[in-house]
Amino acid sequence: MIPHYETDGAGPPLVLVNSLGTSMEMWRPQVTPLGARFRLVRFDARGHGGTPFEPGPGGSLTVDDLAGDIADLLDHLGIERAHVAGVSLGGAVALRLAATRPERVDRLVLVSTAAKIGTPEGWCDRAEQVRAEGCASISGAAMGRWFSPAFSEDQPETVAAFRRRFDACDAEGYAACCEALGAMDQRADLARIAAPALIVAGTADEVTTPADAAFLDERLPDSRTLLAEGA
C-alpha cells in the first residue's frame, strides 16, 4: 500500500493524483478551498515524494499497478467510492481506475491527460536518460513544457519549487512510470467508462493537446471539456 498520504477536509471523498515527477505537494494550494467541500486524499505515487519505488508483480510497472494502488489506499481508509482528479499521468491512472474498477469511482476530473500519451520510443528514451543521468538532467526541459514563459516570469518561486521536487524524484521510479506510460493505450476502453468526466486542457499544451481532449470527450459516454486559453 502507498505509505505516504494525507487526508484533509470533510465531505464526499476526492482523490487527487499527481503528475509524473511531482509529489502530493503540487496540490497544496487547493487543500483549503477544496477541503471546505470534500474529504481530500493526497498521496505520493511509487518512486515519488515520500513513497519509495517498488516494481509491480511482473517486475516492471504498469498503469494498472498505479490504479491498483489507489484502490488499496481507498480500502485502507475505508472509502468505498470517491471522486478522482488527476493531472497528466495522474489523469491516465484515474481513467484506468474508472475502467477497471468502476464501482470505486464517482466522478472524474481529467487534467492535461490523454488515453495515449506520446510514443513508446520517446518514453523509453526518456527512461534511459533518467536512469543514466538522474531526473535533474531533464528538469529544465520539463519546466519549459509545464509552464508558459509568462507564468515562469510572474511566479518564479512556484516554478523553482516544482523543479526542486522534480530533481529529487527517484530516478528508477520516474523511469518506470515513463515505461508505464509508453506501454499505455486506453483508447479502446473509453466507451465503457461510466463515470461523468470533466476534461480540462490547455490550448497551448503540445503534449496532451486539445485534440487529445476532444478525443476523450468524443469517446467518453458522459463528459464535458473546459479549455484553458494559453495554458
Image (cartoon, grey):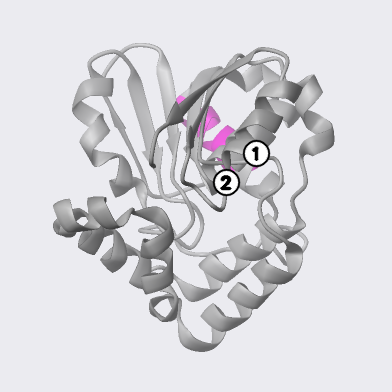
Residue numbers of the magenta segment: 68-77
- Pinpoint residue 188: horizontal percent, then vertical percent: 84, 34
Q: Residues within 10 Å of mark 2 (few under 14, many from 20)?
A: many
Q: Residues within 10 Å of mark 1 (few under 14, many from 20)?
A: some
Left or right: 95 in relation to 86: right
Q: Quadrant of the C terminus?
A: top left
Left or right: 82 in relation to 93: left
Element under disc 2: loop
Q: Residue at x 19, y 26 (%)?
A: 32
- Pinpoint residue 98: horizontal percent, then vertical percent: 67, 26
> How much space separates mark 1 and mark 2, taking CA atoms?
6 Å
Q: Which residue is mark 2?
A: 208
Element under disc 1: helix
- Is residue 76 part of the magenta span, yes or no? yes
Q: Amino acid at mark 1?
A: Asp
Q: Which residue is mark 1?
A: 212
